[in-house]
Amino acid sequence: MLKKLLFMATIACTAAPAAYAGTGPLVLGASANPPKGPGPGKVFMVNPSSRTARAASFAKAGTPGGNSFYAGYDAATQTVFVPSPIGRITMLNANTGRRMGAFPTIRGARVARVLPQEHLLIVLSAKTLAAYSLASHKPAFTIAVGGNALAANSKETKLYVGGNMDQQITVVSLPSGQVIKSYPVARSGDLVMADGKLFSADIKSGVMSVVDPATDKITRIKTSEVDPNFSYAAIPHATAGFMQLASSQNGQIVYAAGFSGHILKFSATSLKYLGEISIRPAKGMNQLSGLAIVDHGTNALVTVENRHETALTNLASGKMIHIFKGVASNRWIVASDT
């Protein structure tokens, strides 16, 4: 039996509320875990304004069903869709953390994304891309395109799919599910759209590639976020490398969490590297992974993976505002910023 809910307070002497109160930002993320094997089976629900975090259970801890990477969120129904590699999507209520049901999906899936305009739930594994109706959960299409990163254009007519191990970004037409083209951009650790352009982070080379779909032009921006001894087999020991990407609300700035302990900034309009923000919640190594821009672009919620904690940080100064102990996600999603 799956546990209905596991609450966890992250502020000393302060109990977490029984439900999200609807005030301040709400940021969601599956608990950090390795790419393969058992996982903790938890989704964190963080309210940066009240400095509180809760954990909801979607699977039994220590099992393969408890492994997930990137959860999807449907704002219309306040539903969190949590994929797991055993071939199951579990649905949680974002306000209460209660389990709302589950349905079968492709095996190996660890990434989900909700496309509200197309009323689709997109699910991705290393080898397969699948789409489901948000209302009925019936399959819309399944194609042999894999990876670990997804992004959609603003009209949700095109889906971009990439992966750490892939040599290209595949473009899929929606809602048909037909592959229409590809771009020669390798090793997409994460993808994000900003100012109508597609940003792709290469964890290995420290290069941010930017695709302009209107012209098909590709711009490659070099940075110092490079570990010369990087190995996919030993990512936890890396000293640099891009992780999650996030854009500002106006779409003019793209941020990248770096394993070096920096948040890197890029202009989506001029396609220039704008420098970095040092994140130092403690001495020593601070490997950043999950990233969310909150408080209307003022602050960032960023996972310090090696310390298994998450820092709320001012983007202008890099000053630590709060540390959420025991809270870590490889990929955050902003469910609400009001």
Image (spheres, grey):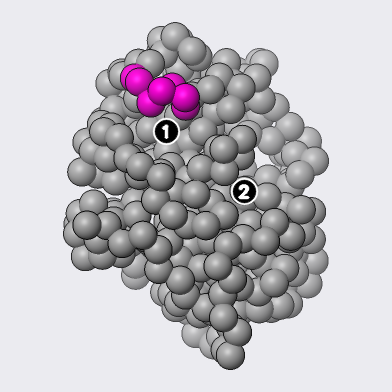
In this view of the protein, which residue sits in the foreground, 243 or 83? 83
Question: What is the three-letter code of the residue carrying label 2?
Answer: Ala
Left or right of 195 in this view: 69: left
Q: Can residue 188 be seen in this snapshot?
A: no
Magenta-drawn segment: 132-139
**Residue 214 % position (x, y):** 67, 16
Distance from disc 1 to disc 2, alpha carbons, whole Å, reads: 23 Å
* Residue 318 at least partly seen: yes
Name the residue nearer the viewer: 283 or 103: 103
Q: Which residue is mark 2?
A: 335
Q: Is residue 136 magenta?
A: yes
Query: Residue at 48% of width from left, 36% of height from top?
Result: 113
Membership of 323 in magenta stretch: no
Q: Which residue carries the number 1 mark?
A: 162
> Which residue is depicted at the point 42% across and 38% down?
112
Q: Does residue 329 appear left or right of residue 11 in this picture?
A: left
Image coords of residue 273 (percent x, y): 70, 49
At x 61%, y 39%, the residue is 75
Q: Circle 1 sits in a helix, a strand or a loop, which is it?
A: strand
What secondary structure do most residues of the magenta stretch adopt?
Answer: loop
Q: Nearer the viewer, residue 27 or 250?
A: 27
Question: Percent x, y for residue 36?
Answer: 23, 54
Q: Position of residue 242 (x, y in %)?
A: 50, 54
Quadrant where the N terminus sits is bottom left
Q: Amino acid at mark 1?
A: Gly
